Image (cartoon, rainbow, N blue to C red):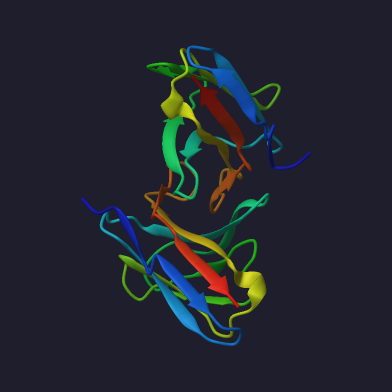
Amino acid sequence: RKEVEQDPGPFNVPEGATVAFNCTYSNSASQSFFWYRQDCRKEPKLLMSVYSSGNEDGRFTAQLNRASQYISLLIRDSKLSDSATYLCVVNKNQAGTALIFGKGTTLSVSS
Amino acid sequence: NAGVTQTPKFRVLKTGQSMTLLCAQDMNHEYMYWYRQDPGMGLRLIHYSVGEGTTAKGEVPDGYNVSRLKKQNFLLGLESAAPSQTSVYFCASSYSRGYQPQHFGDGTRLSIL
């Protein structure tokens, strides 16, 4: 299994739709999880951290399943401005020197 | 509130030329990183630093050197540029190594002819 794996998409959805992305990670010792957003030719920006109990930020909900080693991101009521690539990010291990970035899932929201 | 600043934003080099990319952060972060991003490859870690005066190799260090003489600055050097180093380079910084999110600069687009 790759360290962090995501479905590259693209996911093409209409405005107002609900869309979910999944991400799997290989290292069961990983402790920190994040979703980043990257617009075309721009830098990655932190969207939200992912906590064990799951967490929500407005229209965005993140879930963590440690037993199955996957993370999900749910976007409700999609907006045109949500069109971007979403990166799943996991720390390598407890003494990890850096975060491991997935290759990203591309979302395109159309009117 | 600048965050992480990278210079230059764009550069075109000829094969064999050398150059230095500068990264500066004003968040008092201990950890700094250099990544490259290529189509279909995602972000790959080149080198990182866990504090002033320290550097370490990442996933793809060959052909690059780094220095961290001051806490706020992290320099990435290409001694003899090759076309395979054509990429978008991102610098990032964080409070801790693996538990806090990283904050990115807006990138340097480098083309090697």
Q: Position of residue B61 (x, y in %)?
A: 61, 70
- Quadrant in which residue B60 is drawn: bottom right
Picture quarter with the C terminus of chain B: bottom right
- Work out whether residue B7 or residue A46 is closer to the camera in this orientation and state it: B7
How far across and how far down the image is residue A29, in percent? 64, 37
Image point (36%, 58%), residue name:
B30
Residue sitting at x 59%, y 44%: A101
Q: Position of residue A109 (x, y in %)?
A: 52, 24
User: Is residue A6 shown above or below B6?
Assistant: above
> Relative to B17, is A85 above or below?
above
What is the tally of numbered marks visible in this picture?
0
Q: Residue furthest right?
A: A1
Instruction: Tell me the residue at 53%/59% (across/down).
Output: B35
**Looking at the image, which is closer to me, A109 or A5?**
A109
- In the figure, B104 relative to B99: above or below? below
Q: Is residue B103 left or right of residue A24?
A: left
- In the figure, is residue A39 to the left or right of B27? right
Residue for point 67% across, 71% down: B84
Q: Residue furthest left?
A: B1
Residue A106 shows up from this direction? yes
Give the quadrant of residue A72: top right
> Closer to the camera, A111 or B28?
A111
Task: Looking at this view, name the residue that lies furthest to the front.
Answer: A111
Residue B30 appears left or right of B61: left
Asked whether residue A71 appears in the rendered view, the answer is no
Query: Residue A90 versus residue B91: which sits nearer the camera?
Result: B91
Residue A53 coordinates in the image, percent (x, y):
50, 16
